[in-house]
Every structure is written in structure tokens, then in C-alpha cells.
Image: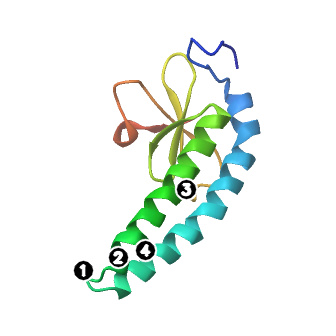
Amino acid sequence: MSGSSNEPRHWSLASARALLPDVRERTAKAVPEVEALLAERERLAPEDPARAELEARLRARIAQWARSMEALGVDVKGLWLVDFDNGSGYFCWKWPESSLSWFHGYEDGFEGRTRIQ
């Protein structure tokens, strides 16, 4: 990985894979917390005043996860989806994948990802 705070961080496949256990651990902690909040939300009627407070807690927990990912230097691309910029595209990981096995170009996005050989 290289770069200063003003330029994008570029990851080698080895450095991205070395960080993946930390990414997975932080995500594994957040997922059940968010799922519990979502389940709680489903039990509330849309007009229930408690729903707004629950929505705020849900947004806050997802934002906390996203900030923790960004603090590691990875790009958050969606819920439980992160990319590692390698200078020519991204190594792509999505929960609950066990390994970092996908790549996509800058213009391709998640739908265009291909398995790393």
C-alpha cells in the first residue's frame, strides 16, 4: 500500500488479503446488530413513533461500520461491500465471502467483477 492522505491508497493483493481478517471481524460484529435492528423495525407499524428512533439507530450503526472501514483505508461501496483500490481497478469483497477473490475495473462495478486467477 502506498500514498499520503492526499492521494488514493493502492493495495497489492497480498496487503488487501492481509487486512481482510480485520474487515471481516468488524463486519461480522456489525451484521447481527443491524439485522436485530431491522427485525425490530419490522415488528413496528409504519406510524409507530418508536420507528423514527429505531431508524436513527440503524443509520448510526451502519455509518459506524462504514467509518471503521474507511479508517482501514478501504472504499465502502454499499452495505457490507468494500473495495481495495489497486491502481487499475478494485479487489472487491462482500459479506459473507470468506476470501478476497474478486476484481473489477473502475467502470465495471460489482456486477462486472471477475474471479481473481
Disc 1 from disc 2: Cα separation: 7 Å
Relative vertical location of residue 75 with respect to residue 21 in this rendering, above or below: above
Tell me, for residue 31, which label it has, or none. none
| On-image quarter of the N terminus | top right
Q: Mark 2 points at which residue?
A: 51
Relative vertical location of residue 71 with respect to residue 106 in this rendering, above or below: below
Q: Between 96 and 30, which is closer to the camera in this rendering?
A: 30
Query: Residue at image x 48%, y 23%?
Result: 89
- Tell me the element at label 3: loop
List x then y, in percent, for residue 61.
Answer: 53, 59
Q: Mark 1 points at which residue?
A: 46
Q: Which amino acid does label 4 sit on?
A: Leu
Q: Which amino acid does label 2 sit on?
A: Arg
* Dot 2 alpha-carbon crowd within 10 angstroms: few under 14, some 14 to 19, many 20 or more: some
Q: Name the residue under label 4.
A: 38
Query: Residue at image x 57%, y 59%?
Result: 96
Q: What residue type is labelled 1?
A: Pro
Q: Mark 3 points at which residue?
A: 95
Marks 1,2: beta carbons within 8 A:
yes
* Dot 3 alpha-carbon crowd within 10 angstroms: few under 14, some 14 to 19, many 20 or more: some
Disc 1 from disc 4: Cα separation: 13 Å
Relative vertical location of residue 87 with respect to residue 117 in this rendering, above or below: above
- Tell me the element at label 1: loop
